[in-house]
Image: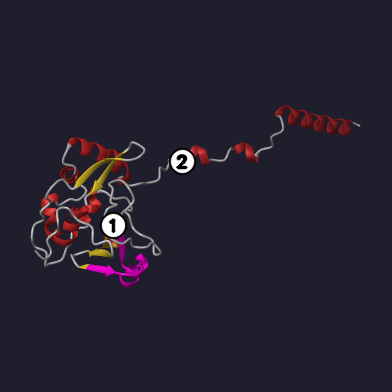
Amino acid sequence: MGNAVSPCFQQSSNSAVKLIFWEGNTRILRGGRHLAGEIMFEFPDQMVCHADSFFIGHPIPALAIDDELARGQTYFVLPIDRFACRVLSASSLSALSSSSPNNKAPINFGNCPFEYLKGSNGRVLIKVMPEFITRLITRGNNVNDQIGSNSNSPSNNKFLCSTPELQKHYEQLVGSKEQLWSPKLETISEHKIRFSPCRFIDKKPKSTIDFRSSCYIANAMNAFCI
């Protein structure tokens, strides 16, 4: 059977930690205490993710350096540059496809890659099954042929969300997060920045100026007549 993935995705023995690397290599860590930072130090361009914690529309479950690897659990060691966004989406899953030239076999997607759950707050959760991610990172060379050549296309999301209900909740959870952000810049019209001419003109009432001028003229005429 070799590299076959168990459909039940049974957890490793209670005394060991299983690591599944991108492109298919695996490693079993036995005994002692193991930290995610040990793997990150050995593979600085990789991140360690708990295999059973991938939820559409939620942050990618990347561990911190000082997080301890739990015994009996499975973790994915994935390239950081495969994730353009920190929120998991169908595009993120498509990007996980292994591009190794040795992986030419088509992917056997098996059952629905999503598990439909409800969180403690009553909101919908769409969990990505660990065995589906395992197939992507180990035999996913042709994943784009089956999911769609454009990972951002609506057909890609519809393939992964195999039921209308899943598709509806996928759009609610992820749709707004995948939209590109751009600042809204309001056009500044010329009249908003033009200075008022009143700033450079004496603001005293015109009547006051005319009255003073008349007084000066009258005084001058009186002096001339005298």
State yes or no: residue 49 in magenta: yes
Estimate the spatial distance between the alpha carbons at disc 1 and disc 2, rounded to whole Å: 38 Å
Dot 1 or dot 2: first in sequence order is: 1
Q: Nearer the viewer, residue 117 or 213?
A: 117
In this picture, residue 222 sits left or right of residue 81: right
Instruction: State the residue position of label 2.
Output: 188
Of the 4 image quadrants, the one containing the N terminus is bottom left
Q: Is 21 situated left or right of 201 in this image?
A: left
Q: Residues within 10 Å of mark 1 (few under 14, many from 20)?
A: some
Q: Residue at x 37, y 46 (%)?
A: 182
Residue 155, given in percent of the width and then of the height, sits at: 16, 44
Amino acid residing under circle 2: Ile
What residue is shown at x 11% (from left), y 55% (from top)? 107
Residue 139, by quadrant, is bottom left
Task: Find residue 97 and report its image quarter.
Answer: bottom left
Name the outermost residue toward the right.
226
Q: In the shown orientation, is residue 27 left or right of residue 198? A: left
Q: Amino acid at mark 1?
A: Phe
Query: Relative to the observer, which residue lies in front, 173 or 118?
Result: 118
Q: Is residue 220 left or right of residue 2?
A: right
Quadrant in which the C terminus appears: top right
Q: Secondary structure at mark 1?
A: loop
Q: Between residues 18 and 88, which one lies in front from this camera angle?
A: 18
Looking at the rendered structure, the secondary structure element under dot 2 is loop
Taking the spot 77% from the left edge, 32% from the top edge, the residue there is 213
Q: Which residues are magenta?
A: 27-50
Establish if 90 lies above or below 39: above
- Residue for badge 1: 83
Give the label, 1 or 2, closer to the camera: 1
| x and y percentages locating residue 69 in the rendered image | 33, 62
Q: Is residue 44 visible?
A: no
Residue at the limit of the structure toward the front, as seen here = 14
